[in-house]
Amino acid sequence: MALDIEAIEREIDRLETKETSHYVCSRLAYLYTVRDHMAPKTEEGKTQWMSGSEFLEASSGVSYRRLMSILDEHMSALSVVQPAQYESIMAKIRALGGK
């Protein structure tokens, strides 16, 4: 039976919600390793493979610079139409330790 990335991600998601135990950690370590080796290799300047939402999946394997350009354009629009939401997002980003 062939494994696919989606099945591995589902099992990782399931195990990450369980109480931490030696078994769970060991199983997660195996799954993380398999997932990382099965994920498409990315070229420098491209985003890594991500899952969890439609946005993350659509953002996988694309040019980092182009993705940031699109997000920057939308953040500029958000700063005008929803300034409070814009400031909230910016505060979260600044809290990550950037400038």
Image (cartoon, rainbow, N blue to C red):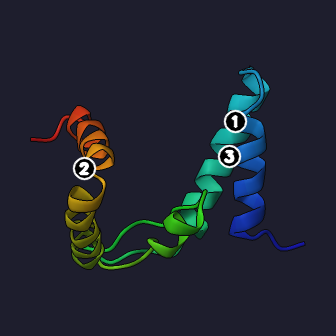
Q: Residue at x 52, y 62 (%)?
A: 50
Name the spot of residue 87 as percent of width and height, x first.
24, 43
The quadrant where residue 2 appears: bottom right
The quadrant where residue 91 appears: top left
**Disc 3 and disc 2: Cα gap in Å?**
44 Å
Q: Which of pointers 1 and 3 indicates the residue nearer the eye?
A: 1
The first of marks 1 and 2 along the sequence is: 1
Between 96 and 50, the one nearer to me in the picture? 96
- For residue 99, side relative to residue 85 (left or right): left
**Disc 1 and disc 2: Cα gap in Å?**
35 Å
Identify the image quadrant of the C terminus: top left
The first of marks 3 and 2 along the sequence is: 3
Name the spot of residue 84 as percent of width and height, x first.
29, 43
**Disc 1 and disc 3: Cα gap in Å?**
13 Å
Q: Residue at x 15, y 41 (%)?
A: 98
| Callouts 3 and 2 close, C-beta under 8 Å | no
Q: Which residue is mark 1?
A: 16
The first of marks 1 and 3 along the sequence is: 1
Numbered mark located on residue 63 in the image: none
Q: Which residue is mark 2?
A: 83
- The amino acid sitting under disc 3 is Tyr
- For residue 49, side relative to residue 21 (left or right): left
Q: Which residue is mark 3?
A: 30
- For residue 72, side relative to residue 27 (left or right): left
Q: Which of pointers 1 and 2 indicates the residue nearer the eye?
A: 2
| Callouts 1 and 2 close, C-beta under 8 Å | no
